[in-house]
Amino acid sequence: MSSVLLVFPETHYKNGQVPLGLGYCAGALEARGHDVAILDLVHTQRPLTELRRLLRRRQFDIVGLSVVTTHLTPASYVSRIVRQAAPKALIVWGGAHPTVMPAETAAKPEVDIAVAGEGEEVLPALADDPSRRDLPGLTFRQGDTLISTGPPLPIADLDSLPFPARHLVPMESYLRYWYSLDAVSPKMRGTGIMASRGCPYRCSFCQPTLSMLFGTRIRKRSPGNIVHELEQLRDTYSIEGFMFEDSTFVLDRKWVLAVCDALRPLNMLWCCNIRADLVDEELLAQMTAAGLRKVNIGIESGVQRILDEAYQKQITRQDVDRVVSLCRKLGIKVQGYFILGVPIETREDMHETIRYAVGLDIDDAVFDIATPFPQTHMYNKWSAHVTADFADFDCFQKCVFRNLHGVSPGWIERQKKLAYYRFYLHPRRWAYTSRMVMTPTGLGRTLMKARRV
């Protein structure tokens, strides 16, 4: 039996989403009899002190980190602490960044193995025998040479996976900061689950990373398996609502309807991510009858040229307007995601996106700064215009593109902040904004989200 520490190296932006990737890996490790601990830095008081305390108190055979590009700096710092305090521990990086940049990751002196793709089968096999190097999806150093064992293998049956080991994380902290259904009630206790993996679309800001992580085939859990997890969450943590964290929940209409049939007896409220071109009134009505109260839509831009040329979204503003109207008719809350700052955007393009967002009859909005994460279509198309190292990327605060129309990064960053003020201070949202800041829970969540503005 091995002792394994899993670290989520987020240090800046607290939210209520349990790191499900680490949770699934921990559950798979425990099912094989291994001793597991999880440390989420942003949900831990004095996290580096706690890390050092853990390393003094327990001898870990493996320390695994889930790393996206924006975590590069804290992940490297954590790994160097581990290397110093526990020199015999095997340091393994997994997640999106090691998946798309395995050689660059494995070349770091503070990393022993980079794992591409899903980790629920690889990590337990490494814990069974830390000397193994024949598992698919590994990249590691051998002397001065980097060795790769080939592409990872997607997990065939998602129902075979143990549920995420939420008992290893501070769930009350996550529940306190969970905001996915704030538009319905800022007092709601809830959490996120994943019902499917994969996405067939080619959106430039996240593909082909998603396909490299989860494969090109969409895999789905059975309705009964999903309901079993939700029953456990309700009984253990008294949750009232949940969010399907799937990239796009509505890809398979027949499966969605089967899931809705299974959800109805639970009498729980939920939300999910949808595409504006994949739903109609009949489907939304069935989902609403099963507890749907909010949808999140990737709208990205109010300018069709930007949607087509920059984001490869394959949707139109008419699609968005239609779905927002249907949601309003059915009483479904709506959150829109928007992006500002790709190199081909003019000032007027960005003004139009903000005008469109503010004018839409939606409840919530998220404005991000266009960030070309490595190996995405966006990065490959405009890599010559990237002005920062990957370790400095921050899609909430920093523009790292050189604009083709001479728009300065500072102007784009200011417009992003202004977009939030214009959106939430619009008269149609005064009641919602006031309700959020007038309750202790809502105020806490609002201040947490404000750090990203």
Image (cartoon, helix red, strand yellow):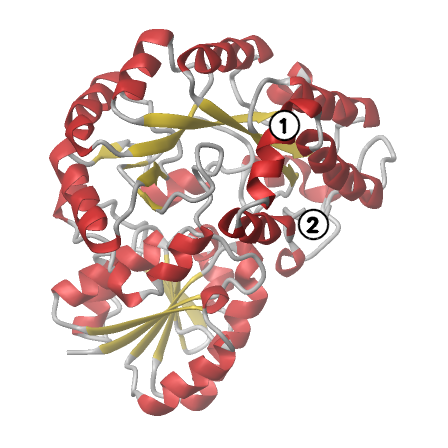
Which residue, as the protein is rendered here, is positioned at the far front?
438
Pointer 1 or 2: first along the chain:
2
Which residue is tagged 1? 429
Which residue, as the protein is rendered here, is positioned at the far right?
406
What residue appears at the point 34 percent right and 82 percent down from the top-left corner?
89
Task: Let me know if residue 95 appears in the view.
Answer: yes
Q: Quadrant of residue 354?
A: top right
On the rendered structure, is 418 left or right of 33?
A: right
Residue 451 against residue 49 in the figure, above or below:
above
Residue 304 against residue 10 in the figure, above or below:
above
**Numbered label attached to residue 189:** none
Residue 176: image location, x then y, percent? 43, 55
Disc 1 element: helix
Disc 2 element: loop
What residue appears at the point 19 percent right and 36 percent down from the top-left corner?
221
Q: CA distance from mark 1 to mark 2?
A: 24 Å
On the rendered structure, is 225 left or right of 59?
A: left
Residue 272: image location, x then y, percent? 38, 31
Task: Let me know if residue 109 appears in the view.
Answer: no
Residue 156: image location, x then y, percent? 17, 41
Viewer-proximal residue, 261 or 311? 261
Which residue is tagged 2? 397
Residue 184: image location, x then y, percent? 44, 32
On the rendered structure, is 36 left or right of 305?
A: left
Q: How many marks?
A: 2
